[in-house]
Amino acid sequence: MFKIVKFANCVECRGLWETFESHAYCTGFQSYAWISNWQKTIGNSICAKLQIIIVYNVDGEIVMILPFMITQKNKIKILSWTFGDFSNGLFHENFYSVFSKHTFTKVWKNILQIVEHFDLLYFANQPELIHGFRNPFVSYLDSYLSYSPNYYIKLEGTFLDFEKTLRKKLVQDSGRQLRRLTELGDVKFVFLSDLNINSQLVETLIKMKSARYDSTGANNIFKMDHFKKFYLDFEINCNSIIKTHISALVLNDQVLAVHWGIIKEDVFYYIMPANDWGIFVKLSPGRILLLKLIDWCFQNKIKIFDFTVGGESYKLDWANNQNNMFNYLYANNIVGFIAKIIYQFHTYRKKKKTIKNS
């Protein structure tokens, strides 16, 4: 009834992918542009083996594309979704008219026989809803709730209407900080996308983010060149469903805050913010840029401002909606079973520590 085909890289199925993504349920992180850029920078550097699964119905029509990868850690082969803030597949708009839980489970078992050998399957950061569409990997598999939620803003009415929903002190403080900045010189807000992206702004973002990672003791991903290249060399073509977007707050030609994100149709993904942590940090440049960026989204007919995955407390000041995130673990053999137990133990300890500190 269903035909399952596996591809080892993006290029082999580019045409099929770009055609399907134009009308499928997916996020920007499942676009061909996102994953192909990831493969040629980060993916190749970490020796990730892509396992792109395309499922056809009896009429030869694609019903889902599943971008998986296999990586190895401590000699354990792990099957997971490819890199991105949200992890899921691309699904046909009439998916649920074709797939019941029983049908999906049968096809899923066949898929697991087709992918290369793995020990542990770990699907993290799976959204419960994909733009209103129920994620079958949450609905039909034994996924469990993640403690890292997804907050977003549903942009309705005007920007002034939105401001009225925020805490009064937050709006007043932001306005006062912006006035203090204007007293220090020429303040500009920069908004650029795709071919107009300024590589110097991306380099500034990387320097700011890297300095912040080092000062807090966090894992500095930008010490690895392939992560730098992912953002600096990100390529978009005319068939892509996403656009890259960069914005900045500039005072007298000095960049105080910058953000890199992507846009898919009427959804803006807030991915990589950074700001100067020097003498201007007390004027909240990151918050001021965020407010102006939301205003820009209203002006450009964006309907969803998505903070992506992560339960950072500042997001609660802005968000008016939440999407639950789910994980899924499956042991394929005894090695995977032991790894699953160890992972569950560490996750339990981390969750307990997070609750204690909240």
Image (spheres, grey):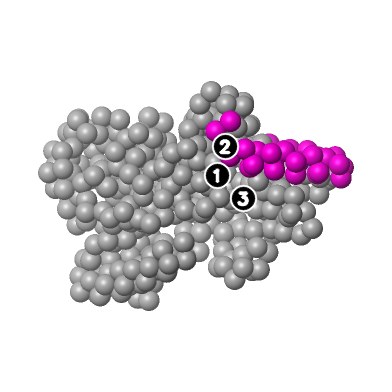
Q: Position of residue 156 (x, y in %)?
A: 51, 26
Q: Position of residue 140 (x, y in %)?
A: 21, 46
In contact (CB < 8 Å): disc 2 and disc 1? yes
Residue situated in front as seen by the camera: 334 or 69: 334
Kindly identify the amino acid type of the residue bearing the numbered disc 2. Answer: Leu
Image quarter where the N terminus lies is: top left
Residue designated by label 2: 166
In contact (CB < 8 Å): disc 2 and disc 3? no
For label 2, the SS is: loop
| Mark before the other along the chain sequence, 2 or 3 | 2
For label 1, the SS is: helix
In contact (CB < 8 Å): disc 3 and disc 1? no
Residue 206: which quarter of the image? bottom right
For label 3, the SS is: strand
Q: What stretch of residues is rendered in magenta?
A: 164-192
Q: CA distance from mark 2 to mark 3?
A: 21 Å
Q: CA distance from mark 2 to mark 1?
A: 7 Å
Question: How dense is the environment of label 3, judged by Cα within 10 Å: few (below 14), some, or many (20 and up)?
Answer: many
